[in-house]
Amino acid sequence: MRVRIYQPAKTAMQSGRAGTQQWVVEFDPEAEARSEMDPLMGWTSSANTRAQVRMRFDSMEEAVAYAKRQGYAYSIEAAKQREMRPKAYADNFRYDRIDRWTH
């Protein structure tokens, strides 16, 4: 059994970074766990319930310790660090601007 350990990125629908500080452990999809379509409703179903499990940990070390304790092979995906440039509304009206200020 193989698990993936990563920090989730923020979604496009949120402006804050809530929920991105925790580490997530989820199982990799298996080749033998194929999904089937329900003929009545058209929903897809599978016998593999591990595809629905997503565990959260406060640190990467806790997630790795859990995977080792359970005997899972794991892979860690490092999150890209976000570059924050300070911005101020007053910079639009500075006298030493390079571009012309027009309305």
Image (cartoon, rainbow, N blue to C red):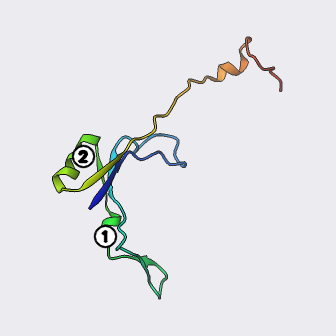
Of residues 5 and 90, the one drawn nearer to the viewer in this rendering: 5
Q: CA distance from mark 1 to mark 2?
A: 22 Å
Extreme residue in the bottom direction: 40
How far from the left and from the top, in percent, is residue 81? 46, 34
Which residue is the site of mark 1? Answer: 49
Extreme residue in the top direction: 96
How far from the left and from the top, in percent, is residue 87? 60, 24
How far from the left and from the top, in percent, is residue 68? 19, 50
Viewport quadrant of the N terminus: bottom left
Viewport quadrant of the C terminus: top right
How far from the left and from the top, in percent, is residue 84? 52, 28
Looking at the image, residue 94 sits to the left or right of residue 71; the answer is right
Q: Secondary structure at mark 2?
A: helix
User: Which residue is at 32% across, 50% downward?
Assistant: 75
Q: Classify 10 Å Cα crowding around label 1: few (below 14), some (14-19), many (20 and above).
A: few
Which residue is the site of mark 2? Answer: 64
User: Which residue is at 39% across, 41% downward?
Assistant: 78
Looking at the image, residue 97 sits to the left or right of residue 8; the answer is right
Amino acid of disc 2? Val
> Does residue 28 sit above or below 37 in this rendering?
above
Amino acid of disc 1? Thr
> Does residue 52 sit above or below 10 in this rendering?
below
Answer with the quarter of the image where residue 20 lies: top left
> Does residue 35 sit above or below 90 in this rendering?
below
Q: Secondary structure at mark 1?
A: helix
Tell me which numbered mark, 1 or 2, is placed earlier along the sequence.
1
Of residues 61 and 14, the one drawn nearer to the viewer in this rendering: 61
User: Which residue is at 33% across, 57% downward?
Assistant: 26
Total number of numbered labels? 2
Q: Nearer the viewer, mark 1 or mark 2?
A: 2
Q: Classify 10 Å Cα crowding around label 2: few (below 14), some (14-19), many (20 and above).
A: many
User: Which residue is at 23% across, 44% downward?
Assistant: 62
